[in-house]
Image (spheres, rainbow, N blue to C red):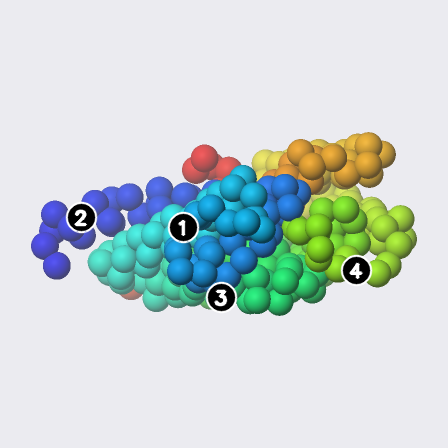
Amino acid sequence: MPTWFTAPLVRFQRAFAIAVVIAEAGIAVTGSVVRVTGSGLGCPTWPECVAGSLIPVEHPEVAPLNQWVEFGNRTLTGVVGIIAALCVLSAWYNRPRRPRVLKLALVQFGGVVLQAVIGGMLVLVDLLWWAVSIHMLVSMVLVWAAVLLVASLREGDEPAVPLVSKNVMRLQVVQAAVLGLLMLAGTFVTAAGPHAGDAATPRLDLPVPTLAQVHADLLFLFLGMLIALGFMLGRHARRAYAILVAAVVAQGAVGMVQYWTGVPEVLVSVHVLGAGVVVVATANLWTATRVRPHLDEAGLRSQTAGSSVASHV
């Protein structure tokens, strides 16, 4: 390929990686807007918006606003796909080509394709709550992987070397699992609540207060592990740790206000944004406690300082 094409790709590789973090988290927020506005079936077919048209047209059973909200979210999927494709191309044309960077970029592009398929399935199954939960959780996994992609650009390609004790590493693994359960419980609360994406969509038939309590208990467990982690980290990754603490406290505050005020629509989207921020911050701390050595010019292993998304944005 000509250098006029490949040179900009390589030059802006880090910018593309940071953009895909923002895009993956952002599209989860726009998905919540679809849900709280009742626009989940604004485009009742897939891949067309309505039968015979890829874009919204006048329809006797669907309000124009609902059509455009859902169509806008579908369009943003294409934008995320373009950014992910740029990540892949920049990794492919970079020299020397780095397999781990390329794999993480391919995860982003493949994830966008997977999410498009899941989104289509959501329409076909009329927004069944468990399918919506899967859609949300996959988004958060892709956000985590996007943070790893950003970090990989300043790391080497050797296996990760811990900068902290084995107990800290084990705690981070458990903490990541608890975070996954916390996100899952959050989708259950929404599934049982008033914002199902469409007025006719069946809700999860469980009491909202019980599900909210489970969600809160998992948050307290996560917070307890975070406090323990703070004592165990010592001097390592203090900035990344402080960012995570701030994100979790803010997210917890939004959740409590959300529950006390009857789950207003705007706070649902703010809470989803907070979930993405917490995932970014947790993954950021994960990368800050590890370093991947690289080969220097003499062919000997050397280590580079771990990177964090916070240092690039």
Work out how far the residue at label 4 is from the one at label 3, CA to CA, in angstroms.
Answer: 23 Å
Residue 150 at x, y = what percent?
43, 49
Disc number at residue 204? 4
> Which residue does the numbered mark 1 point to in the structure image?
55
Q: Amino acid at mark 1?
A: Ile
Name the one closer to the observer, 312 or 72: 72
Q: Is residue 216 visible?
A: yes
Kind of element beneath mark 3: helix
Q: Amino acid at mark 2?
A: Ala
Kind of element beneath mark 1: loop
* Label pair 4/3, CB-CB below 8 angstroms: no
Neighbourhood count class around disc 2 (C-alpha, 10 Å): few under 14, some 14–19, many 20 upward: some
Q: Residue at x 18, y 48 (%)?
A: 7
* Eye-nearest disc, 3 or 1: 1
Work out how far the residue at label 3 is from the one at label 2, CA to CA, in angstroms.
Answer: 33 Å
Disc number at residue 7? 2
Q: Tell how many labels.
A: 4
Name the one closer to the observer, 278 or 228: 278
Q: Quadrant of residue 118?
A: bottom right
> Which residue does the numbered mark 3 point to in the structure image?
117
Q: Quadrant of residue 173?
A: bottom right
Q: Earlier in the sequence, mark 3 or mark 2?
A: 2
